[in-house]
Image (cartoon, rainbow, N blue to C red):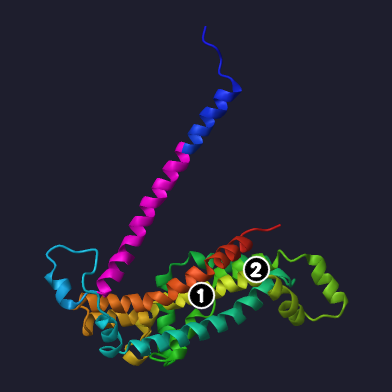
């Protein structure tokens, strides 16, 4: 009869199985990372190629033989890319600031204040997340047009100053603050406003920072709404500027210059994400965990 496996054999077999799973996991992640990063690599390499070198290639080359910065110069001289950056900066900063005011008060009301119909109202707010974005855009477009706010910063900003998801995320974070702390503050005569900004917001700073970063990225990438509400170049954002460059600039013929413009526009978001990616994950995890 065959001898039964010893504990040592079982442990060795389990260890080998774990190593195989680890290797397969890393191989799969490496392949996925290459598939995701390859378009960025090709974009950056192409941006440093001259127009002549790019057109002379019979098969696309992944490397640059004679790198040049001329494409980046053209991105700022042939089209008003600096103006697109300024518009996007104004849009992102003002929208994020106004949204913070709205969601902080809304989240605090749902998390701490007691009023009739609060649960029903919050359920209604959450149900708004199920409405397709396209339907909301149509309504916003008609409203902004009727108000005569097309081709204005106000028309760009107003529909983006609130977010049901961010209210929910911040509400969950506020509810993690012990109720006893709120009661103690009320006993000391602290007003709700003072308690909110001196205690709640500092304690929930990771979530607030996360929301700010995500909103700035969202504003930077915004395309559909700015494209609908603005048809004058002086109000274009960088996302719309790319399309304008492709249609009326140098993009259709000069692909390297187009890629240079895309690289310039993408760099700020990549830098922001690299610097703050841990805070983003920390804030999302904090907002999604109670107790």
**Residue located beneath label 1 in the image:** 215
Q: Quadrant of residue 7?
A: top right
Q: Crowding near pointer 1: few (<14 within 10 Å), some, many (20+)? A: many
Q: Is residue 267 magenta?
A: no
Q: Residue furthest top?
A: 1
Determine whether, in the image, residue 229 is placed left or right of residue 105: left
Q: Is residue 36 magenta?
A: yes
Determine whether, in the image, residue 33 is placed left or right of residue 168: left
Residue at (38, 82) in percent of width and height: 226
Majority secondary structure of the magenta segment?
helix
Where does residue 213 sit, x and y in percent of width and height?
A: 53, 74
Q: Determine the CA span between mark 2 and mark 1.
A: 17 Å
Picture layout, residue 14 above or below residue 37: above
Q: Using the image as rendered, state which of residue 289 and residue 35 is in the foreground.
A: 35
**Residue located beneath label 2 in the image:** 171
Q: What secondary structure is marked by label 2?
A: helix
Q: What secondary structure is marked by label 1?
A: helix
């Amino acid at each position: 009869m065959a001898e039964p496996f010893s504990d040592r054999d079982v442990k060795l077999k389990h260890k080998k199985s774990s190593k195989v799973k680890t290797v397969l996991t890393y191989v799969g992640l490496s392949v996925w990372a290459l598939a995701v990063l390859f378009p960025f690599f090709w974009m950056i390499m192409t941006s440093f190629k001259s127009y002549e070198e790019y057109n002379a290639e019979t098969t696309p080359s992944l490397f640059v033989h004679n790198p040049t910065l001329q494409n980046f110069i053209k991105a700022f001289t042939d089209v008003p890319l600096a103006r697109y950056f300024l518009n996007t900066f104004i849009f992102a900063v003002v929208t994020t600031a106004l949204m913070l005011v709205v969601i902080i008060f809304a989240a605090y009301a749902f998390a701490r204040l007691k009023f009739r119909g609060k649960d029903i109202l919050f359920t209604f707010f959450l149900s708004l997340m199920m409405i397709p974005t396209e339907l909301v855009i149509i309504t916003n477009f008609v409203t902004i047009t009727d108000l005569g706010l097309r081709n204005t910063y106000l028309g760009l900003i107003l529909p983006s100053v609130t977010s049901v998801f961010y209210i929910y995320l911040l509400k969950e974070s506020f509810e993690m603050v012990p109720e006893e702390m709120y009661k103690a503050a009320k006993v000391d005569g602290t007003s709700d406003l003072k308690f909110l900004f001196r205690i709640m917001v500092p304690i929930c700073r990771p979530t607030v920072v996360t929301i700010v970063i995500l909103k700035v990225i969202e504003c930077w990438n915004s395309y559909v709404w700015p494209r609908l509400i603005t048809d004058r170049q002086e109000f274009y954002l960088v996302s719309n500027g790319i399309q304008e460059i492709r249609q009326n600039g140098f993009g259709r013929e000069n692909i390297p210059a187009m890629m240079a413009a895309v690289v310039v526009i993408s760099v700020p978001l990549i830098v922001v994400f690299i610097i703050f990616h841990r805070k983003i994950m920390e804030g999302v995890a904090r907002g999604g965990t109670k107790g």
